[in-house]
Image: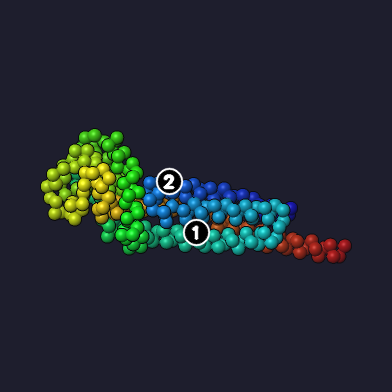
Amino acid sequence: MGVSNNITAVLNFVAMVSSIPIIASGIWLASKPDNECVANFRWPILIMGLLVFLVSLAGFVGAYWNKQGLLALYLFSMALLIAILLILLVFAFVVTRPDGTYDVPGRAYKEYRLDGFSSWLRNRITGSGSWNKIRPCLAASDICTKLTQNYITADQFFASHISPLQSGCCKPPTGCGYNYVSPILWTNPANPTADPDCYLWNNDQNQLCYNCNACKAGLLGNLRKEWRKANIILIVALVVLIWVYVIACSAFRNAQTEDLFNRYKQGWV
């Protein structure tokens, strides 16, 4: 195995290692309760990580056993994957840039407005067809019941930093003026006309605020927060992959030159 192929093999091993954080990010996103209820958001990053690993493995095998055809396929496939990953990153940053967060006086947690998020995200989540599938999935989870295990008094709850999903789905909007009994039990709204969601709140554990716009906004807030974290890992992995790919291209050209030179020498011997 020539020096250039040695370099390419090492670089592809680095690429395989860099695919692990991508796969781990995909698994982390897929395991989140909100992503479990939004099927379309669960798998893209995990699939990308697996494809990067497989393509890098093909490049490693091609370099180690000097399979020029396999190396050429690796270079083409990796260029395609890098382009797709770059497009995915840019798209994810664009659609998660708007933030529907707003502060609530006297509360440590924040609340969320549906119209504060990108129209693309809203259309994928809040359409009647989509929400009719998402809502029962959220209601069947333990997202809200966990709050009753962690917070007892109103002061504890109001000082908490609950997730966007819990803020939107597990309690009524603060503006309604409901009185706190427990994190998922509220009574006697003082201002029920403050928000249409005030009339949708229900103390039934299977309903709560799952029909509220606040719940839809909370879900978008959760998705935005999680994808923003995953994007940081993807950026680092993408930089490594581009660096590996540029050097691998140079090593591939050098390997072809070495092979041509060796054939030329053999012809003269």
Q: Residue at x 42, y 61 (%)?
A: 91
Return the mark for residue 25.
none
Front one among 201 and 228: 201
Residue in the image at 38% along x and 50% along y: 37
What's under tag 2, amino acid-wise? Answer: Ser
Residue at image point 25% right, 53% down: 212
Q: CB under 8 Å between callouts 2 and 1?
A: no
Instruction: Determine whether, in the image, residue 157 is placed left or right of residue 24.
Output: left
Marks 2 and 1, how far apart in space? 21 Å
In front of the other: 188 or 257: 188
Mark 1: which amino acid?
Leu
Question: In the visual, does 161 lie left or right of 3?
Answer: left
Element type at marker 2? helix
> Where's residue 17, x and y in %?
57, 48
Q: Which residue is mark 2?
A: 31
The residue tagged 1 is 85
